[in-house]
Amino acid sequence: MKLPFLRRVWRRADEMEQYQSDQSAKYGFIFYTVTLLVWALYDWISTGDSGWQFSILLVGCAVYFWSRAIYSRRMSK
């Protein structure tokens, strides 16, 4: 059984689609980072505890920079 629509869905992205995807990921990451930072600062000022959102922010940033270093190392080889 052939599914012709899968060929269109799973095709490799061209340069423009890759650029759009990269820009969307960048702005999404910036939005979530700023939102979690503001929320953590608000909780820290109002309650004296940074809460779990600061932990999520730190883990997200660590994953981002770790994956960026890995991909950068792969591209340089």
Image: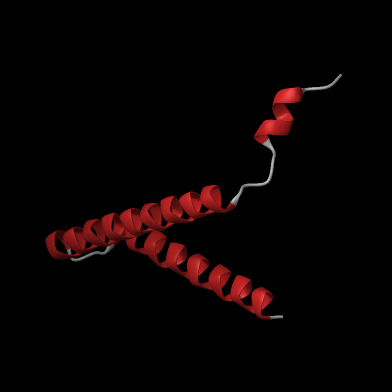
> Which corner quadrant holds the N terminus?
top right
Which residue occupies the foreground of this view, 58 or 34? 34
Name the outermost residue toward the top: 1
Q: Image height check: is 68 above or below 52?
A: below
Task: Please tell me which residue is depicted at 28% across the width and 59% down the height of the picture.
Answer: 34
Name the outermost residue toward the left: 46
Rendered location of residue 19, percent (x, y): 49, 54
Residue 36, quarter of picture = bottom left
Task: Please tell me which residue is depicted at 43% across the width and 67% down the height of the picture.
Answer: 61
Task: Name the side, left or right, on which 9 lies relative to 22.
Answer: right
Rendered location of residue 53, percent (x, y): 34, 57
Q: Image height check: is 37 above or below 11?
A: below
Rendered location of residue 18, percent (x, y): 55, 52
Task: Please tell me which residue is depicted at 32% across the width and 54% down the height of the picture.
Answer: 31
Q: Image height check: is 18 above or below 10?
A: below
Which residue occupies the foreground of this view, 30 or 53? 30
Which residue occupies the foreground of this view, 32 or 71? 71
According to the image, what is the colour scheme of the structure?
Answer: secondary structure
Name the outermost residue toward the right: 1
Q: How many marks?
A: 0
Task: Name the side, left or right, on which 9 lies relative to 65.
Answer: right
Residue 55, quarter of picture = bottom left
> Which corner quadrant holds the C terminus?
bottom right
